[in-house]
Image (spheres, rainbow, N blue to C red):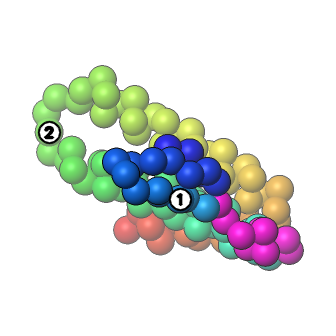
Amino acid sequence: MTFGSSQFAGNELVSLTTFPAQSQLVTPEQIRRFELLRLAFFVLKLRKLEQTHEGEERVTQEYALRCSLLRHTIFQQVITLTRLNAREQAIQLINTCRR
């Protein structure tokens, strides 16, 4: 099923719509807030993953890969937020989420 198109599910017509055009991020503040929200999501996801595997003696390859990917994503978000003049907010958010 694709967004913005209609597909048949059985005999019923199912329609999925995309975001309305007026819901785009326009101002720098809106973009910063969205990127900070994305950063929070990734940091909390990493924290949950680490807590789930806390105390395990053996580290699996999949766990290590997931942690590595999330850390890379967090790093990229910090770079993006630095470009948006929100580096201090990003670091503060990371520190808060890691507690």
Q: Which mark is residue 56?
A: 2
The residue carrying pointer 2 sits among few (fewer than 14), some (14 to 19) or many (20 or more) residues within 10 Å by Cα, namely few
In the image, what residue type sits under mark 2? Glu
Q: Residue at x 56, y 45 (%)?
A: 2
Q: Quadrant of the C terminus?
A: bottom left
- Which x, y percent locates residue 63? 30, 33
Q: Residue at x 13, y 33 (%)?
A: 57
Residue at 49% in and 36% down: 69
Characterize the magenta stretch by its predominant secondary structure: loop
Residue type marked 1? Ser
Which stretch did the figure color magenta?
A: 18-27
Front residue of 5 and 47: 5
Residue 93 spot, x, y in % from top left:
55, 69
Per the model, the C-alpha gap separating discs 2 and 1 is: 45 Å
Q: Secondary structure at mark 1?
A: strand
Closest to the observer: 92 or 84?
84
Q: Does the magenta portion include 34? A: no
| Identity of the residue drawn at 47% across and 56% down | 13
Comparing 55 with 7, the one in front is: 7
The residue to which callout 1 is attached is 15
Q: In the structure shown, which secondary structural element does the residue marked by tag 2 occupy? A: loop
Mark closer to the chain start, 2 or 1: 1
- Tag shown at residue 53: none
